[in-house]
Amino acid sequence: MPRRPQKPNRRASAPSPSAPPRREFRLPESTTPALPAVEDFAALDMPAGLLKTLTAQGVTAPFPIQAATLPNSLAGRDLLGRGRTGSGKTLAFGLAVLARTAGLRAASKAPLALVLVPTRELAQQVTDALTPYAAAVDVRLATVVGGLSIGKQAHTLRRGAEVVVASPGRLNDLVERGDCVLDDVRITVLDEADQMTDMGFLPQITRLIRQVRPDGQRMLFSATLDGNIDRLVKEFLTDPVVHSVDPSAGAVTTMEHHVFHVQDETDKKAVTARIAARDGRVILFLDTKRSADRLAKRLLAAGVRAAALHGGRSQPQRNRTLEQFKSGYVTALVATNVAARGIHVDDLDLVVNVDPPTDHKDYLHRGGRTARAGGSGSVVTLVLPEQKRDVPRLMSDAGIRPRTARIASGDAVLATVTGAREPSGVPVTIEV
């Protein structure tokens, strides 16, 4: 693989991690023209094993973000991609990483490519999505996240892995322990970069990227762009190709947005229970772990197969709950923002904000669990009287024009939009 020219040293003049974030983000203008998009994977310079696996997986044509970015990422260009969740970003960067790593072998503790993600769920999703493609080109993957045995992860790195998918906190721990060395990393990907910076990972991210090869390739993917993303782009990307898909990050034609005003907490509980009892799966978002647990318990008592998903559960519990939801054994997933990114569930057509989020980015990423990959879906937000002033501003910031209605639990519009129906009232038990 040809080496890229040495990048200029921008570290001395780069903003420190503690510097205040810029308020505005301006897309950089590339001085080198981007390579044209392709209409077919076969037009890309990729190993035959990847092309064969795409066909076997039923992936017949690239999504827009894949068609536009892959010619450039395969050529080794730095890249800034903006696209809503579900737009195909994982394969957009994953195929390039695997194609450019195929045929190479990592030394013990020294990966060749790094994918940073904000949550354990997203790390597992990325690993699962890339595993068949990695096997096709004999590339070893390792997943490094908190909540699981650090000793086992260190052992995996000692055995050697070409591509590491990691959360910043756990990877920093392994680097500090001497169980991982980043000097050989030639491709670095930041997936869901906006959420990582929102979660306070910015200092850890910069610490990690400053350890990788200075002449390496960097790709940054984000659903929204803000001042912290601007800092990462300015410090770490050189003449990046810029591509944007679904700029409003969720206001797509296949997704409907509804705001339902409810009279009080009692009515809100009744509306929530009827929606949860629908014939089909639904994710119900709440603000806190405690409220998620309370709602899940209340729904189980009413006869709804519900389970809570939040940061207070162990990783094995979270994994089991997700599998139960994906299989349909659990039909109502009661979640906090830990599930707003990193969960991919096929054919999920309804997301409900039982508690409206306070930030428009949280709204977009909660809603991004539905209408994925060109599918259709609805996002419903329940609003109490004391919240009615804040929600219009939230929707405006998100670029959303929702349909608004004042509803009660028995209203026909509720059933029409969500499939709401009366719970059976027969208590059920779900093993978590």
Image (cartoon, helix red, strand yellow):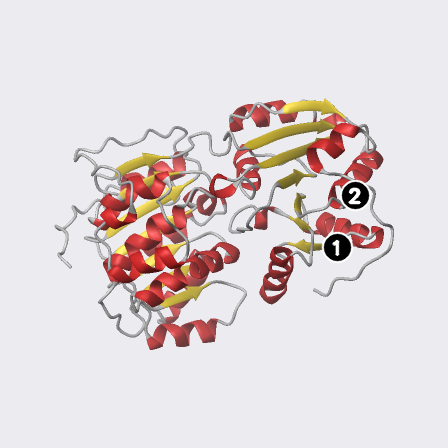
Residue beneath disc 1: 305
Q: Is residue 118 left or right of 385 when viewed as pictured?
A: left
Residue at the outermost right position: 425
What's the amino acid at mark 1?
Arg
SS of the residue under disc 1: loop
Q: What residue sits 37% from the left and 30% below the top? A: 25
The circle drawn on residue 157 is none
Q: Is residue 240 above or below residue 208?
A: above
Q: 114 or 95, which is in the foreground?
A: 95
| Amino acid at dot 2 | Ala
Q: Residue 18, how many percent across, how many down?
A: 39, 43
Residue 273: numbered disc = 2
Residue 157 % position (x, y)? 36, 72
For residue 424, above or below residue 391:
below
**Lateral position of residue 267 relative to residue 317, left or right:** right
Q: Quadrant of the N terminus?
A: bottom left
Give me the residue at 55% from left, 44% from top. 369
Residue 391 shown left or right of residue 152 in the figure: right
Front residue (pair 125, 165): 125
Q: Name the residue: 49% across, 54% down.
A: 122
Q: Give SS at disc 2.
A: helix
Tag count in the figure? 2
Can residue 117 be seen from the camera position used here? yes
Q: Quadrant of the C terminus?
A: bottom right
Q: Where residue 320 sits in the image (x, y, percent)?
A: 62, 64
- Tell me which corner region of the image, top left, top right, bottom left or bottom right, holds residue 3: bottom left
Question: Which badge, 2 or 1, is on the more N-terminal residue?
Answer: 2
Q: Dot 1, how many residues are within 10 Å of its Cα: few (below 14), some (14-19), or many (20+)?
A: many
Q: Is residue 315 left or right of residue 281?
A: left
Instruction: Give the x, y percent position of residue 152.
Output: 46, 75
